[in-house]
Amino acid sequence: MNRRSILVLSLLCVISFAQAQDEEKSAESTKGFKKENFFTGGNIGLGFGSGTTSFGISPHFGYSINKWIDVAVSVNYNYISQRDYYEVNDKLRQTTIGPGAFVRLFPVKFLFAQAQYEHNFIRQKYIPATGSYISPAVYKVESNSLLIGAGYTSGRSVGNNSYYYFSLMFDVLKDPYSPYLDTYGRVLPVVRAGYNIALFQGRNKKY
């Protein structure tokens, strides 16, 4: 599954890059960055459950290479606090910071395939209940993730790179310390929804 996913993604990147090269050769102006192709955006998440509180934010900053490809750098920050983890009134707090980058390929303006690499820094702090026999502890680990999946947008088009998006991805690397695996090592779906914001883009701008 992992090798097939990575192979398919690699083929898509090669095909899209070849298309981009052809478009650049036929364009009148091919040198330098165009400021109207820059974009930013991201998503914010907040959750509450039985003894659990979570917060996450994932901003990104990127560039549209052409009408088929977006590339961006990103960082994910997630905080989870859970009570009654081992025993009543204890606490477990986990912070994850994951800098990375992604590429989005748009076969049509409202659908995309995405590959996102992250290097996650994970810190867990365990706070035992008062009078507990368990000692407090702090754990720090690092983990690499490669999220591959697809998404839907409200409509990305030439001259308009602002849109809502929804994506579903899976970590194909399956690192034992990945934040996208459950306690049994099973891959969890990564669902994200957010907004992409075009920068310096007028109504009639083209890639």
Image (spheres, rainbow, N blue to C red):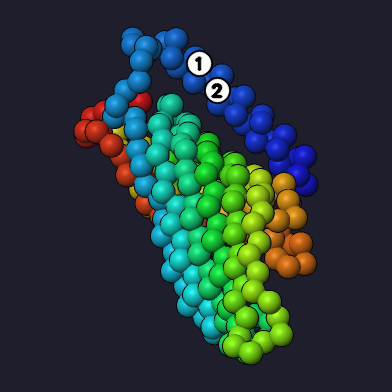
Q: Is residue 108 visible?
A: no
Image height check: is 141 above or below 199?
Answer: below
Q: Amino acid at mark 2?
A: Phe
Q: Which residue is mark 1?
A: 21
Along the line of sight, the residue nearer the viewer: 24 or 189: 189
- Depth check: give the residue in front, 185 or 132: 132
* Number of marks drawn: 2
Question: Is label 2 in contact with label 1 (beta carbons under 8 Å)?
Answer: yes
* Residue 144 shows in the view: yes
| Residue 158, x across and y down, in percent | 34, 32
Q: Is residue 184 left or right of residue 101?
A: right
Image coordinates for residue 37, horizontal then vertical, percent: 34, 30
Label 2 – label 1 distance at C-alpha: 6 Å
Along the viewing direction, whichever of 158 and 77 lies nearer the viewer: 77
Badge 2 element: helix
User: Which residue lies under the disc numbered 2?
Assistant: 17
